[in-house]
Amino acid sequence: MPSVRISKEYISGIYYLTFTVRNWYYLFDRHHRFEILADSLTYCQKHKGLTLYAYVFMLNHIHLIVSAPDMIAFVRDFKKFTSKEM
């Protein structure tokens, strides 16, 4: 898995993020997995200070426009939680 490409000097700000599934496998098309993503984002909004401006869930990737006090921590925790839930 590639490392987070957000510089430590720029941890706060508004970012356009894309998370893709390895080999573009259609992972989000069954078992209510969109709900897992939505629940994870809601949790981050309530507990991590995430501000969610826009999002799109696709079958094999998601797009987010977000800001957070610590973007690196958000990316780390979001990917860790959603991968365990799926």
Image (cartoon, rainbow, N blue to C red):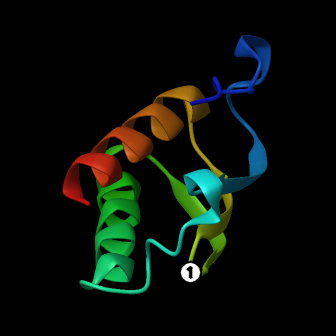
Say few, some or many: other residues with alpha carbon within 10 Å of mark 1 (under 14 / 14 to 19 / 20 or more): some
- Pick out the residue farthest to the top: 8
Residue 27: image x %, image y %? 44, 71
Q: Is residue 67 above or below residue 30?
A: above
Q: Please indicate whether residue 57 sits to the left or right of residue 54 in the image.
A: left
Towards the viewer: 47 or 19: 19
Q: Quadrant of residue 68?
A: top right
Residue at 55% from the left image edge and 67% from the top image edge: 25
**Residue type indicated by callout 1:** Leu
* Quadrant assignment for the N terminus: top right
Q: Is residue 11 above or below residue 35?
A: above
The mark total stands at: 1
Residue 19: image x %, image y %? 62, 54
Q: Quadrant of residue 12?
A: top right
Residue at 34% from the left image edge and 39% from the top image edge: 80
* Quadrant assignment for the C terminus: bottom left
Q: Please indicate whether residue 62 sits to the left or right of residue 81 in the image.
A: right
Towards the viewer: 37 or 52: 37
Residue at 66% from the left image edge and 63% from the top image edge: 64
Towards the viewer: 16 or 57: 57
The residue that label 1 is drawn on is 59
Q: Quadrant of residue 76?
A: top left
